[in-house]
Image (spheres, rainbow, N blue to C red):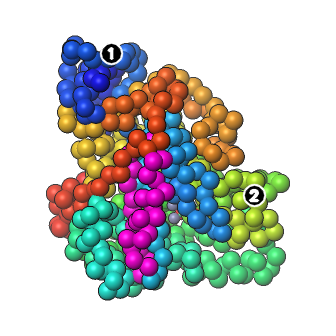
Amino acid sequence: MKKIITNGTIVTAADQYEADILIEDGKIAAIGERLTADGAEIVDAKGAYIFPGGIDPHTHLEMPFGGTVTVDDFETGTTAAAFGGTTTVIDFCLTNKGEPLKNAIKTWHDKSRDKAVIDYSFHLMIGEVNEQVLEEIPLVIEEEGITSFKVFMAYKNVFQADDETLFRTLLFAKEHGALVMVHAENGDVIEHLVKEALDSGKTDPIYHALTRPPEVEGEATHRAAQLTGLADSQLYVVHVSCAEAMEKIADARKKGYRIYGETCPQYLVLDQTALEKPDFEGAKYVWSPPLREKWNQEELWKGLANGQLHTLGSDQCSFNFKGQKELGRGDFTKIPNGGPMIEDRFSILYSEGVEKGRISLNQFVDIVSTKIAKLFGLFPQKGTIAVGSDADLVIFDPTAERVISAETHHMAVDYNAFEGMTIKGEPVSVLSRGEFVIRDKAFVGKPGAGKYLKRKRFADVSNSAKKRVTFQQ
Ligand SMILES: NC(=O)NCCC(=O)O
Ligand SMILES: [Zn+2]
Ligand SMILES: [Zn+2]
């Protein structure tokens, strides 16, 4: 059915203006003043901003990790995402050494099909590079539209890959025009610091943070950046938590390397003291990289404002406090790493960023949606409000105020890391390809309505992917 959204203020990464939006067949068919169309439903958005739907480039839905599985799956996770203003998620498909990549991808399709309420796509983990992997990569890119590959530099004996694997991944990514993503922490050094801590009886959640200091993130970020420069490839550093790592990205960009940084809402508003909460509550805040000393927050905000950091991912990886986080009582290394952020990513960036004057309204859209669509081959289908783009839209009330709480959130997880935080601005209605998923703050979507998205290559969406010095996206 046709729809016309009227009376709202359209905000993109570049513009802000009042106009109507005509939606037809799931796409934006026209933008203009006083639009009419036979049989169109009129949606009044008076007083609201109309944003392109948020894109979350970093989720772990129904992911096995730390001897357990994240509680939010593709149904609860994408429902919560939609309530929060996100209309696309890109989840990490894990692989097992020695197993064909296509098996892992099938597992992820099986988890998500018939469950997702919004559109979704996958990144693929690379744990090893051998002849079999290199043979499969062109098929993964062409048939599955998976154009981003993730290498873990931490989680020794679990996901961690060695430097040769990272370098060979950078090389095949260059050859195929794909983007490499890294979890940048030095897993070998962490292993040693953890052993020292446990040997001296330091078992509380705070030692998770103290055994993963900023230097181990900075060192790995620098190493990955140098290898990217050497390979003349392209790199996206996930979940940048501190100034130490952000500076390494900025230094590499000064040299003309194609390197991008993502941070997450938790690093912008929470700090390391959360891990010291009594009664083992600190375990709720155990994820990697860890929360940092508070002064880092303002540095990360400055990085988002001045272009040293580019995107905001949630790193949604939710484990219940009861029965899951509790596995680590008496040994912080057994606390499953991860937290629930998918629902509040968009609103926290608006409230703490735009409302507090740290970033502009256009920067907000760029960081939460547009830049992500560009880097991950979804633009201009997603990430903007333009004729021909998917009608993934958020009708957002900038005057609304709410307090974040596990009592009212829509994730399946039993706590909220941002409990008690007051947020200004709220998504009222959210459309995915022209259909309401959230209408007047109520869920009206359908599991299975979300479509799997095949993505373009980084090299095809970035006009200077092959050039070194002049690149700016
Ligand atoms: N971040 C975290 O602690 N868990 C999810 C996996 C990862 O992104 O490292
Ligand atoms: Zn990670
Ligand atoms: Zn993650």
Question: In the displayed structure, would residue 374 be above or below residue 157?
Answer: above
238 or 322: nearer the eye? 322
Q: Secondary structure at mark 1?
A: strand
Range shown magenta: 99-128
Q: Is residue 367 visible?
A: no
Q: Is residue 113 magenta?
A: yes
Q: Residue at x 57, y 32 (%)?
A: 423
Q: CA distance from mark 2 to mark 1?
A: 48 Å
394 vs 344, left or right, is left
Q: Label 2, on which residue?
A: 323
417 vs 262, left or right, is right
Q: Is residue 221 magenta?
A: no
Whole-percent x and y of residue 167? 35, 80
Q: Is residue 280 visible?
A: yes
Q: Residue at x 23, y 44 (%)?
A: 380
Q: Amino acid at mark 2?
A: Gly
Q: Label 1, on which residue?
A: 42
115 or 341: nearer the eye? 115
244 vs 420, left or right, is left
Question: In the displayed structure, would residue 145 be above or below residue 54?
Answer: below
Q: Quadrant of the N terminus?
A: top left
Q: Decide: few, some or many residues near mark 2? Use Cα within 10 Å; few <14, some 14-19, many ≥20.
A: few
Q: Amino acid at mark 1?
A: Ile
Number of marks in the rendered image = 2
Is ligand 1 less than 8 Å from the beta carbon at label 2? no
